[in-house]
Image: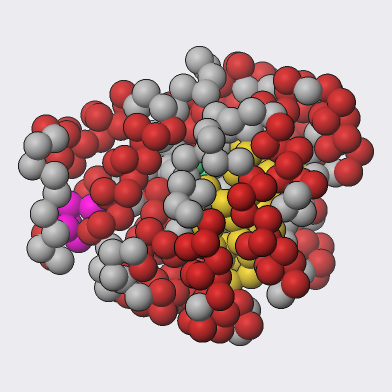
């Protein structure tokens, strides 16, 4: 319909996409074969790309998904594997009308299986350069730290010479916090976020996806996060909601992810209308497109089907996404 044409044409920014979550079952099997990586034999889901995709329709929680997500990325070994993965994502993003993409990756999930950090960076950086040149998409790489691992390990990673170099030379501009949320509160990572702020890095954190709304306030006050990833539990606390609206903090909302991981029963339960009515800024994002059955435009369409935003509301969602991006002011002006 014409609204879907409009949604495609709007100048979209994506702020919440894990590149490892863009690994399609097809590419996963192809890379596993090339790299002679054995996939779990005791799980029927790993028989074929088709059976794996079917299993992705039956996630029961964030942790159920993460089990598959960490096995999937075990197929990624060489710089060209990481480049192929990111390039696959950028092509989808371009087809969906993304102008600017701020993409997450999980360094610890690769170094822990002896894939060197510079290998990961080399592949992703090559895809980012190609996306800028061939697709006109500007990009920012953000390194997420895994909250289910000991905070000391995240600090060790952060302080390692290769990681420091990628921050110093501007290849990686931000940090995030992801993986299992429940029982891993933000305050555990206070030292990491202090270090990132001292280096002048941008800071975001997953909070209020499955976890309580108190994780959102501590991500803001203890971690000094500039953005909140997901943040849907904010609807439970009207005082904090008003504060976040007043501050203009951007939430990076991922509606299809929330349904597939059972944080909500349907897209209509994502508090989009409440956020709009109270002036809470948010962008719409795919999170892990290969696992959750859709890219960014599918998320826009699902929100439209559930909430029927007006054209001017859609324009203001995209404007909030541009203004809340971490690109240069010059680039923002180009997109507005
Ligand atoms: N890692 C990849 N996707 C994630 C999500 N939705 N929440 C937490 N960690 C993740
Ligand atoms: Zn996420």
Which contiguous range is marked in magenta? 28-32
* x and y, in percent, of residue 17 in the image: 51, 50
Identify the residue at horizontal 52%, vertical 62% (top origin): 152
Q: Observer-nearest residue: 282 or 136?
A: 282
Lateral position of residue 221 relative to residue 96, left or right: right
Quarter of the image with the C terminus is bottom right
- Establish if 243 lies above or below 90: above
Lateral position of residue 194 relative to residue 55, left or right: right
Quarter of the image with the N terminus is top right
- Would residue 314 be seen by someone viewing this image from the given angle? yes
Identify the residue at horizontal 15%, vertical 66% (top origin): 35
- Establish if 102 lies above or below 254: below
Q: Observer-nearest residue: 129 or 192?
A: 192
Identify the residue at horizontal 45%, vertical 59% (top origin): 106
Most common secondary structure along the magenta stretch = helix
Lateral position of residue 251 relative to residue 109, left or right: right
- Would residue 127 be seen by someone viewing this image from the given angle? no
Q: Observer-nearest residue: 224 or 35?
A: 224
Name which quarter of the figure residue 261 lies in: top left
Please check the rendered image and state whether residue 2 is part of the magenta-colored stretch, yes or no: no
- Establish if 185 lies above or below 141: above
Identify the residue at horizontal 55%, vertical 29% (top origin): 210
* x and y, in percent, of residue 62 in the image: 43, 33
* x and y, in percent, of residue 15 in the image: 61, 51
Please check the rendered image and state whether residue 31 is part of the magenta-colored stretch, yes or no: yes
* x and y, in percent, of residue 44 in the image: 11, 32
């Amino acid at each position: 319909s014409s609204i879907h044409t409009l949604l495609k044409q709007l100048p979209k920014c994506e702020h919440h996409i894990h590149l490892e979550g863009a690994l399609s079952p097809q590419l996963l099997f192809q890379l596993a074969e090339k790299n002679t990586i054995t996939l779990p034999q005791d799980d029927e889901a790993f028989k074929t790309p088709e059976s794996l995709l079917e299993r992705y329709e039956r996630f029961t929680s964030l942790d159920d998904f993460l089990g598959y997500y960490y096995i999937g990325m075990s197929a990624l070994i060489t710089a060209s594997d990481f480049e192929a993965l990111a390039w696959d994502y950028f092509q989808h993003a371009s087809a969906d009308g993304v102008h600017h993409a701020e993409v997450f990756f999980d360094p610890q999930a690769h170094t822990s299986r002896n894939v060197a950090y510079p290998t990961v960076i080399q592949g992703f950086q090559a895809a980012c350069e190609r996306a800028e040149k061939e697709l006109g998409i500007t990009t920012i790489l953000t390194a997420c730290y895994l909250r289910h691992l000991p905070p000391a390990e995240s600090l060790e990673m952060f302080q390692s010479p290769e990681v420091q170099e990628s921050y110093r030379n501007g290849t990686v501009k931000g940090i995030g916090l992801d993986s299992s949320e429940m029982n891993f509160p933000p305050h555990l990572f206070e030292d990491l976020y202090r270090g990132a702020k001292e280096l002048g890095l941008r800071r975001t954190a997953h909070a209020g996806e499955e976890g309580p709304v108190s994780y959102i306030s501590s991500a803001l006050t203890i971690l000094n996060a500039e953005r909140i990833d997901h943040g849907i539990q904010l609807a439970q606390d009207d005082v904090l909601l008003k504060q976040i609206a007043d501050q203009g903090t951007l939430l990076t909302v991922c509606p299809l992810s929330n349904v597939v991981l059972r944080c909500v029963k349907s897209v209509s339960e994502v508090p989009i209308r409440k956020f709009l009515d109270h002036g809470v800024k948010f962008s719409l994002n795919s999170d892990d497109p290969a696992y959750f059955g859709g890219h960014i435009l599918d998320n826009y369409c699902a929100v439209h089907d559930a909430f029927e935003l007006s054209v001017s509301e859609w324009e203001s969602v995209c404007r909030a996404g541009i203004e809340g991006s971490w690109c240069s002011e010059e680039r923002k002006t180009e997109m507005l």
